[in-house]
Each structure stands twice: as structure tokens, then as C-alpha cells.
Amino acid sequence: MAPTPATDAVPGTEDLDEDTDQASEVRDAADATPMPWAFDTRQFRRTLAWHIAFQPFGMVAGTRQYKHASFAVFEGYAGTSASGFADEVAADKAVAMLDYVEDLYHDWNDGGRSSGGAANRIEAEFDRIRAELGDLPGTVASPERVRTMLRHLTRTLHPGVLNDCFHHAETAVCEKRSPGLGRPLPMLNMCLTCPNSRRSSVHLPRLHQTREQALQEFGDTTGLPPHQATAISEFVNTLDTLIDELAETGAAR
């Protein structure tokens, strides 16, 4: 048998060569086209945890939602401890806190309402800053100077749903009720009447909403033990008082 020339195809392999060429073309096309991303809600699980952690009472809500055994576990997962991106979180939190204090100041400076045990103390500080800045009607204070002078208030501020806390350990109700924790502990009913609390116009609609929800859920106290009925009634009355205080301070100003 004569040898097959090197330049000739081996008999019977034409289809194989064609398939190989087609496979190569497919691979080249796949390399040139980015693979579509397969989105899944679980990919955002830790991002969601980070956002929950920085909401009022977020550590409690996040720990329950993610079914973690302790706050420390959720803190690490959400990036609020050394096991996460703590530096980025701290920097973002500092900016957000200063933004919030600046909003409080401008709300007060524009005649916004405020009340609570810490209202006079914080308003005196706002008044001092306004006088030093010359931030009076018809003038525009430097935003950088405003933020610089407000920065120290962020050290004790803990924003809340129904009030803000400008924490002083000597007078804080949570320090007396839960000693040894080393940090403020949100206690809804106690915070409402704490000397460190301050409410502003941002809290007024939330107070109204909380009152309406309390009446919807617990308005009918028929059949409840007397002490439970009294506790519900006192809670609604407290909300009424806080709402009236904001309305009165707003009218007075």
C-alpha cells in the first residue's frame, strides 16, 4: 500500500475536522462574550445585614432575622466588628451621623419643633453655635464650619425611631436598668421619658403612627388582667403627652 501524503486528509476524518473547527469557533465566541451574571437574592444577604445593623434597634432585628445565636455573631456578619469591614463601616457611620446632626440643627434653626429631657441642653448648644457662626436670617453660614462645630454632638448621639438619645451615663435610665453593658441599651418606654431624649419634627409622624398601632392592637382591653390594661392605657397616654408637647413647642416658637 502506498503511503498517504502528509498534505492529504486521513480518509474518514473529514467530519471530525469540521466538528473540531466548529467547536473552536464556539469557544472563541464564548471567550469574547461576557457570561451573563446569574443574580440570586442570597448574594445580597450580607449587604442587607449591613443596612439592618445601622437602623434603630437593628442589632436586635438582625439577630432575630438571621437566627444568629448572639449579637456578637450578627455584628461580625454585618461587618460591625473586627471580623468584617469595620473601618469602612465606621467611616460611613461617622458621615451619616454628622449628616443627621446637621439636619437636626437646620430643622431647629428654621423653627422646627423639639421636646424631651435633652431638648433644652441641645437647643442651648445649637443657639451657641448659631451665635458664633452668625447663622441668622438673611445670612448663609459656611457648611464646613457648621459641620465642624456640630461634630462633637455625634459622640453621644444615638438616633431613634421615637426619639433621639444624647447619652449621658449619669442621668441615663438605661444605665440604671442595665448596668455593666458599657453602652446605651434601647428601652422603648424608658427612652420616651429619659432625661437624655430629644424629639423633633421628624419623630412626630412616627409618634402618631405608634399611637394608632397601639390602639388598633390593644384598644380593646376587655378580658385582660388589670395590670396589663393599665400598662397599655399608660403607654397610649404617654404618647399623647409627647405628641402634645411637640405641638405646643411648635406653636410657642
Image (spheres, grey):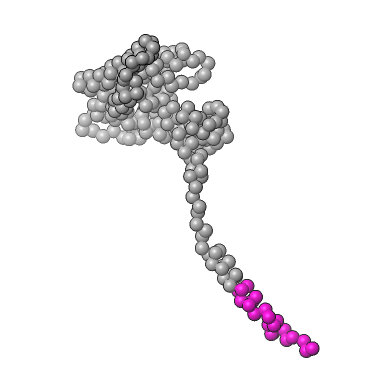
Q: Residue at x 51, y 19 (%)?
A: 182
Q: Residue at x 57, y 71 (%)?
A: 25
Given residues 236 and 230, the one toward you in this image is: 230
Quadrant location of the C terminus? top left
Give the residues in magenta: 1-21
Residue 28: percent from left, percent from top: 56, 67
Residue that protrudes farthest toward the top in the picture: 226
179 left or right, relative to 215: right
Q: Is residue 204 magenta?
A: no
Query: Dividing the picture into quarters, in which one does residue 24 lie?
Result: bottom right
Quadrant location of the N terminus? bottom right
Residue 194: percent from left, percent from top: 38, 16
Give the overall secondary structure of the magenta segment: loop
Given residues 147 and 46, the one toward you in this image is: 46
Q: Residue at x 63, y 77 (%)?
A: 15
- Give the total of numbered labels: 0
177 left or right, relative to 12: left
Q: Residue at x 64, y 80 (%)?
A: 14
131 left or right, relative to 13: left
Q: Is residue 130 visible?
A: no
Residue that protrudes farthest toward the right in the picture: 1
Q: Is residue 2 magenta?
A: yes
Given residues 183 and 15, the one toward you in this image is: 15
